[in-house]
Amino acid sequence: MSFFIQLIVSGILSGAIYSLMALAVVIIYKSSSIFNFAHGSMVAFTAFLLWSLIVQLNVPLLISLPMFLVCLFGIGFLIQRLILQPLTGQPLMATIMATIALGDLFAGVVTLFWPGTGRTLPPVIPSHTIRLGRAVLSSESLVNFFICGICLLAFSLFFRKTKMGLAMRGTAEDHTLAQSEGIRVSWIFVVSWVVGILLAAVGGTLMSSLYGVNFVSLHGLGMKSLAVIILGGLESIPGAIIAGLIIGVGESIGAGYLDPFVGGGFSEVTPFLILLTVLILKPYGLFGYERIERV
Amino acid sequence: MLKKPCGTFDETYEKDTALVRTPFRWVMLLLLLGGIFFLFPLIANNYFLDVANNLGIMIIAVIGLQILVGFCGQISLGHAAFMGVGAYISAMISFHFGWSFWIAMPCAAFFSGLLGVVVGLPALKIRGFYIAVSTLAAHYIILWVILHGGKLTQGTSGLPAHEIQIGNFTFNNEIRMFYLIMIFVIAVIFLVNNMMRTKTGRAFLAVRDSDLAAEFMGVNVFRTKVLAFSMASVCAGISGSLMAHYQGIVTVEHFTLSDSIWMLGMLIIGGPTITGAILGTIFLKILSQVVLFMAPWIGGIFTAFSGSSVAGFTQIFFGIVILLFLVFEPRGLAHRWQIFLTTFRLWPFKTPL
């Protein structure tokens, strides 16, 4: 029983990061209906960028964080203006391939400039284990969980209470209508890309504080968030959060109980098995808009 | 479909349905075939023959993907995995049972086709982007199964496959394989070309342009989509089987997600026709060879960074080329080729673009 509780707790802790990752993609999809396949590479790229600023160039945290934010803003702006704006009105295949090619670009930059493995971010908090009832967890993952929670909360407040959030929600509903209300839709797209990259960077940083700055695991994390998004429904923000927790727990339980039988690495495919099941049974996810279309 | 030059009339039904319409085109086709079969093996050394063989194997797979993506409008991110299924089934039959290629290849084609049907089944309920994600999931699951197949697939160490034989004649060097692969490529091109002129082929195009309109016209949309998936997977299976027996060993590294993406990139660069698939494959393969040739030079520049710079540089190059094509040349090389042909047909008049 305590093994089960342990699995659930660690699943929830990693699930919170998945939720954050999924949110980054959902934001972009909601406003511009472009699905960001480059997400995994972007997570890795931002984590490596931060590592470079803090460890390699040894810039103090108070200067490096604003520099990092400026970089993210510039990247988001350039992606939207140079690549995705010209593709407006092209078929679905074009936007999918554009984000995939973008992902390759980021992945290539990471392999070119930061080869090899074994980088770690400097620890911010002391590491020791905490006992929570019967479950044992590390202080880092608990702090990460709280940071995730704060980010999710801050984001939903931004989305609900501010004028920019309102404009983004309006754009998500209908582009033409939003434009007629005086919202600059192209600007909203830029903002949503910036927010998406920002969330990706937060998730990447949290993940690399646990497992080190490593391209394969960060990229895999981004890819797993695909499953989260599909499960939660493409357009739904609460869906992304709940589905992140479900996938985290499912992955942890699947790995805990099935790994001895199938020879390890089962947590790599559990999210995708869940994804396929969801696509077959309930294709629009738990909270997505159900479009009635018969094929 | 090529337009006829001025003054060519179809007097009989046979003439109207012929694939090659004019004597001039026959001459050009025979020249091309002669160039492939006689001239190229004469002038090329083993290295170029090897490149051409891999190119031919790739063309078969990419034409399969073209049926699915370019003609039927479904997006697959797992095509390399289907190729892997074909390669592994072929190698398993060859290695565990010791049967010949001529039994292993149809089996590989059949089973990957069957798997294509299974992956295509969600097409009943979902479309567009969701199909892409479900094939992506299928890719991860297939690769995981191959890696954890135990003795059957030999996991990471790879599975050997026998050389292809007819009687006592063994296809054991590049030039023999070149002829075999080119015959397969030409057969696939011919069959797919013909298939696109049948009811099924027209149904693919109708489904691509609009599901709803196609269904309204009496096309069984679900059956058409599943058929496209299975045809694509059969092509992938054949290509994977050829690859297994050509290289003599199959490993998972040949069938990664980035291979699927490269194939989609070939389609983007080529454009939505069979010619496009061929041109796109050739273009990207040549590009990757150029990067390989430039490797020492790139290594010299980026020596401060790493030894793995070539892999990173290839990825960056690929990403930029795809993005440039998407933004500036969305109709692909096939469109350019079409303009080139039209220029010749209409000369000395101007080509309308």
Image: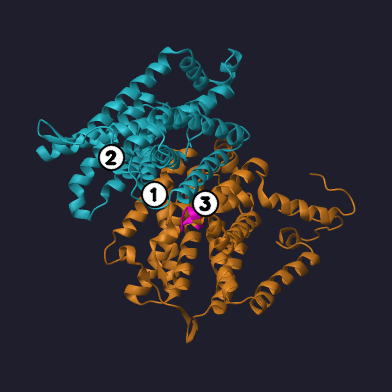
Chain colours: A cyan, B orange
Residue under numbered circle 1:
B138
The chain identifier of the residue carrying mark 3 reads: B
Mark 3: give few (<14), some (14-19) or many (20+) Cα within 10 Å. Answer: many
Label 2 or label 1, whichever lies nearer to me, is 2
Measured as percent of width and height from the top left, residue A161 is found at: 41, 12
Q: Which residue is mark 3?
A: B315
Instruction: Please tell me if label 3 and label 2 are on a single chain.
Output: no
Q: Quadrant of the N terminus of chain A?
A: top left
Q: Quadrant of residue B133?
A: top left
Residue B30 drawn above or below residue B72: below
The residue at 57%/68% (across/down) is B51
Q: Separation of disc 2 and disc 1 at Cα?
A: 29 Å
Q: Which residues are magenta?
A: B304-310
Q: Do tags 2 and 1 sit on the same chain?
A: no
In the figure, is residue A269 to the left or right of B38? left
Residue A279 at least partly seen: no
Task: Give A276 or A33, whichever is nearer the viewer.
Answer: A33
Residue at numbered disc 2? A210
Amino acid on which disc 3 is placed: Gln
Is there CB contact under 8 Å for labels 3 and 2? no
Pick whichever, A161 or A118, lies toward us: A118
- Residue A226 placed where, x, y %? 39, 38
Where residue A183 appears, x then y in whole percent? 57, 16
Within-10-Å neighbours for mark 1: few <14, some 14–19, many 20+: many
Q: Is residue A162 above or below residue A22?
A: above
Residue located at (39% from left, 49% from top): B138
